[in-house]
């Protein structure tokens, strides 16, 4: 062959989608508001198509979710697991570890907490000790479930998206085995009810002293969730480790050159991420369900992914977004047939997520 | 950067899909049955806002599936419409469909009570504990739970019926169909291993043995009441294993459709219209007529004579039906001619009250391993049928069962086990 190289096309006509380099501050703050408004308008169009009055529907939804102390209480009950699991996944996301196994980690946390409440501690254990033990067990359960993909990723570079996703199903089946088998109450898909000392205190439990709290089922878990959000916010802002995690997320190679231990951080982050989701599971069985049950979570672990993303991984924003989502779920009871409510929820979600994507990225010719 | 973008996109798509899958699936559109228009009710277009109307007796229904399921929930919604029509302007009815069993149910029921409904009917087994909890909180609201065993002395009743009688007849028809074509296998789609479902399976097996002594009943447990794709899938695996007739105990008519597609036969469940999906291959459907009972109970509530009880009706109440054999109906083309008089005869005895569920469960009856469970001459008691064990007996003050409904009758495939 001759040494003469064939001239090649030096420039290819290609489009590329990439992250917009900078986003003005006003857009960052205003974009969620714009997106939610846009979503509501699209939803209203859909409602009009079904021949109903969108204003009436929206008003009723808002009223159910935020219009009274009861509404706020119901919404808080739904927001609690979303905040905890959302914080969980946000830790992993910050390091660009795509942990989509929060649902499974949540189930494992609930499983461990149930073990403590029903089998591993005496039934008359004092309440604070019982709850602490359950929370610790729940955290450990979720952490273990996050640790497995963490180890696989750190040591063998196994894709964590696949492993965390698959482990969801394992955890749910594991849970099913116990609620139909060894821990079942008469063969139904649920365990016996926890003793009262294994219940996280609810507002309604104080109705004897404060009658106006009767029927309010919001529980202590929300305080834990909010406290953890604040702790995490401080960690990201002002600790060395928080900074390390961000550096690894932005540029693993640079992080390695800077002497950051990647292996240790991956394992630690996945365990913490799973642990928080596990805590969400504990808080749900101890504060709301009061027993382990088949499918007790309507997909909180998955919704948490969207929550964390929309909140741009900011712990305090996660609280806000969780409340919005919870309100959407609670407000769904306002309209029937149920398909309409779900359709509306889906549309709002879709508009917000896709709109967010458009605002964050731009298309460029290269 | 690009890799990250792809990762993020995949992640969000996955999350959206998963979040959507886990939420209780609803069919694309409710099949044409718009809720009864109540004058001055907060309804807008095809959408209903479940709120009470002032000056009326307000009744709310909580459904586990969508009203368009063509089965269990459809039948309950027919009952609601019947009630609305019978009592007219005096009542306002509303419903909430596709409510998941468990904690969401408690919130939904509590909100209905809080909103000011006078009576609340909850129509799935898993709504029992939440209904009991809320009934205690709202002593001025009436509660009726369908298919459970809990009640109280003041405002909370339970209601169910002896569908086992109709399942027995359905078993006879299935057995006759198989025998007529030289087949020996029949399939049953079983939702949960609870006494209600086991009772229905056993009744179907005993009926089947009347017309096809060498037939066996194969079971698939699906652990859900309503899941169109799982129900269909169970039907497919039953047919793959040789089932000639598929009887479903779950909420939709999907299994009947699946059987029809293979040219095999199905027996549907719950609602009078369930055979419409394939009238040729659907042999019959044991169905519920909730309307008259709903009307009766609501009338009692309105005039203050309602006493919470364990209501349990049998065929002679008129609240149970067997498609093709009730007054004015003709058997489906797939039902073998020779079994028709036989079924009519037993049904007549049931309609007159001469025969009932206790006669079906009268010994000698063996379990599917060949061991004697009900000795000759002994009949099961209501507690036996409902599997009221010592715990529930203590909880409800009822008599405990001695031969509890936790066994599979002869005729059920010998290797079948309760999960």
Image (cartoon, coloured by chain):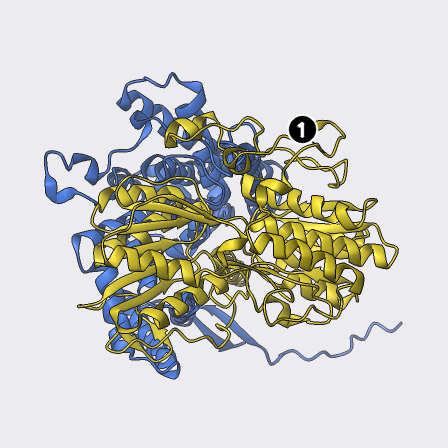
Q: Could you say which is closer to the camera, residue B219 or residue B79?
A: B79
Q: Position of residue B157 (x, y in %)?
A: 35, 46
Number of numbered discs: 1
Q: Could you say which is closer to the camera, residue A256 or residue B397?
A: B397
Q: Is residue B283 above or below residue A102?
A: below
Asked if residue A82 shows in the view, the reply is no
Q: Is residue A119 above or below residue A331?
A: above
Task: Indicate left or right for A211 with B8 as reference.
Answer: left
Query: Disc 1: which chain?
Result: B
Task: Indicate left or right for A215 with B254 as reference.
Answer: left
Q: Residue at x 64, y 42 (%)?
A: B360
Q: Could you say which is closer to the camera, residue A106 or residue A298?
A: A298
Tell me which chain appears blue.
Answer: A
Q: Position of residue A318 (x, y in %)?
A: 31, 52
Q: Residue at x 75, y 68 (%)?
A: B261
Task: Indicate left or right for A107 with A82 as reference.
Answer: right
Task: Indicate left or right for A151 with A126 as reference.
Answer: right
Circle 1 residues within 10 Å: few <14, some 14–19, many ≥20 = some
Instruction: Specify the quadrant that holds the C terminus of chain A.
Output: bottom right
Q: Position of residue B232 (x, y in %)?
A: 66, 59
Q: Position of residue B42 (x, y in %)?
A: 26, 73
Q: Which residue is mark 1?
A: B373
Chain B's colour is: yellow
Q: Residue at x 60, y 47 (%)?
A: B355
Q: Secondary structure at mark 1?
A: strand
Instruction: Specify the quadrant that holds the N terminus of chain A.
Output: bottom right
Asked if residue A30 shows in the view, the reply is yes
Q: Is residue A90 above or below residue B97?
A: above
């Amino acid at each position: 062959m001759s040494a003469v190289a064939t001239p090649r096309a030096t420039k290819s006509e290609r489009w590329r989608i990439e992250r917009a380099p900078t986003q003005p501050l006003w857009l960052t703050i205003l974009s969620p508001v714009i997106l939610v408004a846009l979503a509501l308008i699209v939803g209203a169009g859909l409602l009009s198509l079904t021949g109903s009055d969108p204003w009436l529907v929206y008003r009723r939804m808002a009223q159910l979710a935020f219009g009274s102390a009861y509404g706020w209480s119901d919404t808080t009950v739904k927001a609690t697991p979303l905040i905890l699991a959302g914080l969980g996944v946000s830790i992993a996301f910050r390091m660009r570890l795509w942990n989509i196994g929060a649902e499974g980690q949540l189930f494992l946390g609930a499983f461990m907490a149930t073990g403590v409440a029903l089998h591993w501690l005496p039934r008359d254990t004092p309440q604070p000790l019982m709850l602490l033990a359950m929370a610790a067990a729940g955290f450990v359960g979720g952490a273990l479930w996050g640790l497995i993909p963490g180890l696989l990723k750190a040591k063998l570079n196994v894709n964590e998206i696949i492993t965390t996703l698959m482990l969801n199903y394992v955890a749910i089946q594991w849970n099913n085995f116990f609620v139909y088998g060894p821990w079942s109450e008469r063969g139904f898909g649920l365990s016996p009810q926890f003793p009262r000392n294994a219940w996280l205190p609810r507002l309604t439990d104080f109705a004897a002293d404060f009658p106006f709290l009767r029927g309010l089922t919001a529980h202590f878990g929300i305080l834990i969730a909010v406290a953890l959000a604040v702790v995490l916010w401080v960690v990201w802002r002002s600790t060395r480790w928080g900074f390390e995690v961000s550096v690894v997320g932005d540029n693993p190679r640079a992080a390695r050159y800077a002497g950051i231990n990647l292996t240790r951080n991956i394992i630690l982050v996945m365990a913490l991420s799973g642990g928080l989701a596990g805590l969400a599971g504990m808080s749900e069985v101890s504060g709301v369900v009061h027993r382990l049950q088949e499918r007790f979570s309507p997909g909180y672990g998955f919704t948490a992914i969207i929550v964390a993303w929309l909140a741009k991984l900011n712990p305090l924003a996660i609280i806000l977004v969780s409340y919005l989502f919870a309100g959407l779920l609670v407000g769904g009871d306002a309209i029937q047939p149920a398909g309409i409510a779900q359709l509306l929820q889906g549309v709002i979600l879709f508009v917000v997520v896709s709109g967010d994507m458009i605002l964050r990225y731009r298309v460029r010719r290269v | 950067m690009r890799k990250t973008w792809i990762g993020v996109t995949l992640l969000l798509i996955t999350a959206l899909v998963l979040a959507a899958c886990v939420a209780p699936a609803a069919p694309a559109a409710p099949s044409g049955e718009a809720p009864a228009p109540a004058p001055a009710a907060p309804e807008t277009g095809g959408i209903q806002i479940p709120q009470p109307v002032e000056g009326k007796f307000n009744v709310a229904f909580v459904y586990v599936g969508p009203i368009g399921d063509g089965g269990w929930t459809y039948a309950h919604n027919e009952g609601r419409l019947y009630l609305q029509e019978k009592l007219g302007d005096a009542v306002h009815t509303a419903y909430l469909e596709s409510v998941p069993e468990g904690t969401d149910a408690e919130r939904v029921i509590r909100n209905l009570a809080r909103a000011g409904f006078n009576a609340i009917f909850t129509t799935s087994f898993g709504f029992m504990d939440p209904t009991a909890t809320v009934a205690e909180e709202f002593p001025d609201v009436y509660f009726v739970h369908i298919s459970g065993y809990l009640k109280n002395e003041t405002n909370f009743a339970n209601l169910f019926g002896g569908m086992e009688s109709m399942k027995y007849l359905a078993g006879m028809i299935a057995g006759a169909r198989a025998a007529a074509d030289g087949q020996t296998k029949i399939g049953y789609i079983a939702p949960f291993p609870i006494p209600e479902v086991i009772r229905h399976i056993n009744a179907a097996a005993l009926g089947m043995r009347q017309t096809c002594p060498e037939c066996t009943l194969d079971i698939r447990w699906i652990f859900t009441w309503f899941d169109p794709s799982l129900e269909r899938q169970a039907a497919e695996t039953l047919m793959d294993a040789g089932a000639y007739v598929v009887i479903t105990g779950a909420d939709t008519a999907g299994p009947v459709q699946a059987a029809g597609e293979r040219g095999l036969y199905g027996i549907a469940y719950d609602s009078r219209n369930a055979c419409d999906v394939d009238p040729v291959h659907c042999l019959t459907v044991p169905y519920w007529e909730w309307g008259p009972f709903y009307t009766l109970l609501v009338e009692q509530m309105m005039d203050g004579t309602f006493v919470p009880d364990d209501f349990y009706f049998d065929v002679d109440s008129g609240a149970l039906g067997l498609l093709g054999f009730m007054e004015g109906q003709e058997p489906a083309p797939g039902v073998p001619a020779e079994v028709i008089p036989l079924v009519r005869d037993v049904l007549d005895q049931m309609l007159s009250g001469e025969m009932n569920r206790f006669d079906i469960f009268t010994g000698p009856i063996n379990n599917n391993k060949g061991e004697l469970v009900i000795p000759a001459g002994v009949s099961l008691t209501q507690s036996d049928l409902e599997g009221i064990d010592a715990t529930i007996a203590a909880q409800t003050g009822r008599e405990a069962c001695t031969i509890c409904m936790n066994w599979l009758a002869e005729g059920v495939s010998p290797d079948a086990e309760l999960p």
